Protein backbone atom coordinates (compact mmCIF):
# COMPACT_ATOMS: atom_id res chain seq x y z
CA UNK A 1 0.00 0.00 0.00
CA UNK A 2 1.46 3.35 -0.97
CA UNK A 3 1.61 6.45 1.20
CA UNK A 4 -0.44 8.33 -1.42
CA UNK A 5 -3.19 5.68 -1.24
CA UNK A 6 -3.31 5.88 2.56
CA UNK A 7 -3.41 9.67 2.52
CA UNK A 8 -6.20 9.66 -0.08
CA UNK A 9 -8.20 7.23 2.09
CA UNK A 10 -7.55 9.49 5.09
CA UNK A 11 -8.89 12.51 3.19
CA UNK A 12 -11.96 10.54 2.06
CA UNK A 13 -12.80 9.76 5.70
CA UNK A 14 -12.22 13.37 6.80
CA UNK A 15 -14.35 14.67 3.94
CA UNK A 16 -17.10 12.16 4.75
CA UNK A 17 -17.14 13.41 8.38
CA UNK A 18 -17.35 17.03 7.18
CA UNK A 19 -20.09 16.24 4.67
CA UNK A 20 -22.35 14.01 6.78
CA UNK A 21 -21.66 14.68 10.46
CA UNK A 22 -21.08 18.44 10.64
CA UNK A 23 -23.79 20.24 12.59
CA UNK A 24 -24.09 23.21 14.94
CA UNK A 25 -24.18 21.01 18.05
CA UNK A 26 -20.96 19.16 17.15
CA UNK A 27 -19.34 22.40 15.96
CA UNK A 28 -19.89 23.66 19.50
CA UNK A 29 -19.00 20.42 21.32
CA UNK A 30 -15.97 19.05 19.46
CA UNK A 31 -13.59 21.96 20.18
CA UNK A 32 -14.42 21.56 23.88
CA UNK A 33 -13.79 17.82 23.83
CA UNK A 34 -10.56 18.35 21.92
CA UNK A 35 -9.50 20.97 24.48
CA UNK A 36 -9.54 18.26 27.16
CA UNK A 37 -6.59 16.63 25.41
CA UNK A 38 -4.59 19.83 24.82
CA UNK A 39 -1.07 19.25 26.19
CA UNK A 40 -2.52 16.32 28.14
CA UNK A 41 -3.72 18.88 30.70
CA UNK A 42 -6.76 16.86 31.85
CA UNK A 43 -4.57 13.82 32.46
CA UNK A 44 -1.87 15.90 34.15
CA UNK A 45 -4.46 17.38 36.54
CA UNK A 46 -5.79 13.89 37.25
CA UNK A 47 -2.27 12.52 37.88
CA UNK A 48 -1.50 15.37 40.30
CA UNK A 49 -4.82 14.89 42.10
CA UNK A 50 -4.15 11.15 42.44
CA UNK A 51 -0.60 11.79 43.65
CA UNK A 52 -1.98 14.01 46.41
CA UNK A 53 -3.90 11.15 48.00
CA UNK A 54 -2.21 8.25 49.77
CA UNK A 55 -4.86 5.77 48.62
CA UNK A 56 -4.42 6.58 44.91
CA UNK A 57 -0.77 7.65 44.84
CA UNK A 58 0.38 4.59 42.86
CA UNK A 59 -2.25 5.32 40.20
CA UNK A 60 -1.08 8.91 39.99
CA UNK A 61 2.55 7.85 39.70
CA UNK A 62 1.72 5.29 36.99
CA UNK A 63 -0.26 7.92 35.09
CA UNK A 64 2.63 10.39 35.42
CA UNK A 65 5.05 7.81 34.02
CA UNK A 66 2.72 7.34 31.05
CA UNK A 67 2.47 11.08 30.45
CA UNK A 68 6.25 11.43 30.47
CA UNK A 69 6.57 8.48 28.07
CA UNK A 70 4.05 10.10 25.71
CA UNK A 71 5.91 13.40 25.72
CA UNK A 72 9.20 11.71 24.89
CA UNK A 73 7.94 9.14 22.37
CA UNK A 74 5.29 11.17 20.55
CA UNK A 75 5.95 14.87 20.86
CA UNK A 76 9.73 14.93 20.97
CA UNK A 77 10.62 11.89 18.84
CA UNK A 78 7.98 10.51 16.44
CA UNK A 79 6.32 13.76 15.34
CA UNK A 80 9.69 15.28 14.43
CA UNK A 81 11.07 12.10 12.90
CA UNK A 82 8.06 11.46 10.64
CA UNK A 83 7.20 15.16 10.12
CA UNK A 84 3.81 14.47 8.54
CA UNK A 85 1.92 17.63 7.56
CA UNK A 86 -1.54 18.07 9.04
CA UNK A 87 -4.60 17.83 6.79
CA UNK A 88 -5.40 21.49 7.49
CA UNK A 89 -1.92 22.46 6.25
CA UNK A 90 -2.44 20.54 3.02
CA UNK A 91 -5.94 21.94 2.53
CA UNK A 92 -5.73 25.44 4.02
CA UNK A 93 -9.05 26.38 2.42
CA UNK A 94 -10.84 24.34 5.13
CA UNK A 95 -12.13 26.73 7.78
CA UNK A 96 -11.19 25.38 11.19
CA UNK A 97 -13.10 25.69 14.44
CA UNK A 98 -9.82 25.75 16.38
CA UNK A 99 -6.46 27.43 16.00
CA UNK A 100 -4.21 25.79 13.39
CA UNK A 101 -1.78 23.50 15.25
CA UNK A 102 1.91 24.25 14.71
CA UNK A 103 3.41 20.80 15.34
CA UNK A 104 3.37 17.81 13.02
CA UNK A 105 0.48 15.42 12.65
CA UNK A 106 1.72 11.86 13.21
CA UNK A 107 0.87 10.39 15.64
CA UNK A 108 -1.97 12.22 17.35
CA UNK A 109 -0.67 13.32 20.75
CA UNK A 110 -4.23 13.92 21.98
CA UNK A 111 -5.13 10.32 21.16
CA UNK A 112 -1.91 8.80 22.45
CA UNK A 113 -1.98 10.55 25.83
CA UNK A 114 -5.69 9.82 26.29
CA UNK A 115 -5.30 6.12 25.51
CA UNK A 116 -2.26 5.86 27.78
CA UNK A 117 -4.32 7.37 30.60
CA UNK A 118 -7.29 5.11 29.89
CA UNK A 119 -5.09 2.01 29.80
CA UNK A 120 -3.37 2.89 33.07
CA UNK A 121 -6.69 3.64 34.75
CA UNK A 122 -8.21 0.42 33.37
CA UNK A 123 -5.49 -1.60 35.09
CA UNK A 124 -6.50 -0.20 38.47
CA UNK A 125 -10.26 0.10 38.14
CA UNK A 126 -12.38 -1.04 35.19
CA UNK A 127 -15.03 1.66 35.78
CA UNK A 128 -12.50 4.52 35.70
CA UNK A 129 -10.81 2.89 32.74
CA UNK A 130 -14.04 2.42 30.80
CA UNK A 131 -15.00 6.07 31.31
CA UNK A 132 -11.49 7.15 30.29
CA UNK A 133 -11.63 4.96 27.14
CA UNK A 134 -14.94 6.56 26.14
CA UNK A 135 -13.39 10.00 26.63
CA UNK A 136 -10.25 8.93 24.72
CA UNK A 137 -12.38 7.84 21.74
CA UNK A 138 -14.28 11.13 21.83
CA UNK A 139 -11.05 13.14 21.99
CA UNK A 140 -9.63 11.13 19.07
CA UNK A 141 -12.79 11.65 17.03
CA UNK A 142 -12.76 15.37 17.82
CA UNK A 143 -9.36 15.66 16.14
CA UNK A 144 -10.87 14.22 12.94
CA UNK A 145 -13.98 16.34 13.17
CA UNK A 146 -11.83 19.45 13.56
CA UNK A 147 -9.75 18.47 10.49
CA UNK A 148 -6.44 18.72 12.35
CA UNK A 149 -5.46 15.03 12.17
CA UNK A 150 -5.72 12.22 9.69
CA UNK A 151 -7.56 9.04 10.76
CA UNK A 152 -4.27 7.11 10.64
CA UNK A 153 -2.74 9.67 13.05
CA UNK A 154 -5.53 9.05 15.53
CA UNK A 155 -5.55 5.27 15.05
CA UNK A 156 -1.78 4.98 15.50
CA UNK A 157 -1.89 7.36 18.47
CA UNK A 158 -4.54 5.16 20.09
CA UNK A 159 -2.62 1.93 19.44
CA UNK A 160 0.65 3.44 20.68
CA UNK A 161 -1.19 4.80 23.72
CA UNK A 162 -2.54 1.38 24.63
CA UNK A 163 0.88 -0.22 24.14
CA UNK A 164 2.70 2.44 26.17
CA UNK A 165 0.04 2.31 28.89
CA UNK A 166 0.39 -1.47 29.10
CA UNK A 167 4.21 -1.17 29.18
CA UNK A 168 4.02 1.38 32.00
CA UNK A 169 1.76 -0.94 33.99
CA UNK A 170 4.09 -3.89 33.33
CA UNK A 171 7.05 -1.90 34.69
CA UNK A 172 5.07 -0.59 37.68
CA UNK A 173 3.82 -4.08 38.56
CA UNK A 174 7.31 -5.58 38.17
CA UNK A 175 8.73 -2.85 40.38
CA UNK A 176 5.96 -3.46 42.93
CA UNK A 177 6.59 -7.20 42.87
CA UNK A 178 10.31 -6.66 43.40
CA UNK A 179 9.68 -4.35 46.37
CA UNK A 180 7.06 -6.72 47.73
CA UNK A 181 9.57 -9.56 47.80
CA UNK A 182 11.84 -7.22 49.77
CA UNK A 183 8.94 -6.35 52.06
CA UNK A 184 9.07 -2.68 51.04
CA UNK A 185 5.73 -2.05 49.32
CA UNK A 186 2.34 -3.71 49.20
CA UNK A 187 1.40 -5.22 45.81
CA UNK A 188 -0.53 -3.16 43.27
CA UNK A 189 -4.24 -3.99 43.26
CA UNK A 190 -5.84 -5.14 40.03
Image (tube, rainbow, N blue to C red):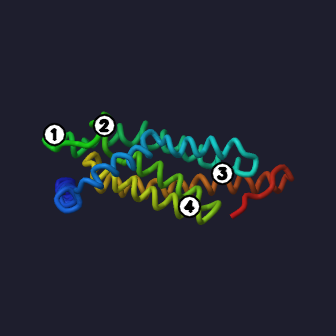
Q: CA distance from mark 2 to mark 4?
A: 28 Å
Quarter occupied by the C terminus: bottom right
Q: CA distance from mark 2 to mark 3?
A: 31 Å
Q: Which residue is mark 1?
A: 92
Q: CA distance from mark 3 to mark 4?
A: 12 Å
Q: Which residue is mark 3?
A: 59
Q: Which residue is mark 4?
A: 129
70 vs 34, left or right, is: right
The image shows residue 60, relative to residue 123, as above or below, that is: above
Outermost residue to the left: 93
Q: Indicate which disc residue 101 carries.
A: 2
List x then y, in percent, for residue 47: 60, 44
Residue name at image x 50 percent, y 57 percent: 163
N-terminal of the pair, mark 2 or mark 1, is 1
N-terminal of the pair, mark 2 or mark 3, is 3
List x then y, in percent, for residue 186: 80, 55
List x then y, in percent, for residue 86: 25, 43
For the residue pair 75 and 19, the one nearer the viewer reads as 19
Crowding around mark 2 (Cα neighbors within 10 Å: few <14, some 14 to 19, many 20+) is few
* SS under mark 2: loop
Q: CA distance from mark 3 to mark 1?
A: 42 Å
List x then y, in percent, for residue 162: 49, 58
Amino acid sequence: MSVAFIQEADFQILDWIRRYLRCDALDWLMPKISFLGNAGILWIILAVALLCTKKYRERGLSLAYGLIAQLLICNLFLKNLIARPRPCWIRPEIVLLVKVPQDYSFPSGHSMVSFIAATVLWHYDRRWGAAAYVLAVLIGFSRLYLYVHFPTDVLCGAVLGILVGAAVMYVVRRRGAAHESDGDLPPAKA
